[in-house]
Image: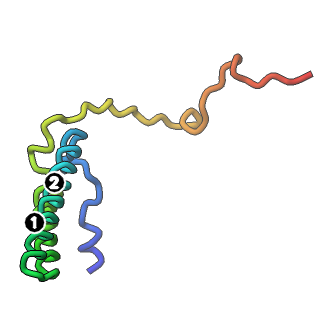
Amino acid sequence: MLSMFKSIPTHMVSLPVMDYKGQKLAEQIFQGIILVSAVIGFIYGLFIQQFGWTVYIMLAGFSVSCLLTLPPWPMYRKNPLSWQPAVPETSGENRDKPQENQSQKKKKHK
């Protein structure tokens, strides 16, 4: 049973990722749907005098907004980021402590 969980990949190398403009668009869509469903739910609940319908309409709006904004749809990945190339790892002490220049060393006070 435990080996089944260990076989699940935990890194996100090959998964599609939203870019920054896609995140902004997803946030605007999410807030717009929530706002519209809140207004419709409030008006409908006020009209029929049932608060429960207001909650149901809000939950439906939340579900629709989650369905539209949580998965990384292609419309959120139109502006991919260009990452810097990976720096190869060096072995030894150079990796652990930075090199010191003579001008950067602390001077003794007199």
Dot 1 falls on a residue whose secondary structure is helix
* Residue that appears at 18% across and 55% down: 30
Label 1 crowding class (10 Å Cα cut-off): few <14, some 14-19, many 20+? some
Q: Position of residue 44 (x, y in %)?
A: 8, 72
Relative to residue 61, is residue 4 drawn left or right? right
Q: Is residue 48 above or below residue 16?
A: below
**Amino acid of disc 2:** Gly
Q: Is residue 84 above or below residue 37?
A: above
Q: Position of residue 12 (x, y in %)?
A: 26, 52
Q: Nearer the viewer, residue 3 or 87?
A: 87
Dot 2 falls on a residue whose secondary structure is helix
State how the image is colored. rainbow
Pick whichever of labels 1 and 2 is earlier in the sequence: 2
The residue under label 2 is 32
* Residue that appears at 17% across and 59% down: 35
* Residue that appears at 15% across and 72% down: 59
Q: Mark number for residue 40? A: 1
Q: Position of residue 45 (x, y in %)?
A: 11, 76
Tags 1 and 2 touching, CB below 8 Å: no
Q: Nearer the viewer, residue 109 or 54?
A: 54
Q: Mark number for residue 23? A: none
Relative to residue 106, is residue 71 drawn left or right? left
**Quarter of the picture holding the N terminus:** bottom left
Q: Position of residue 108 (x, y in %)?
A: 85, 24
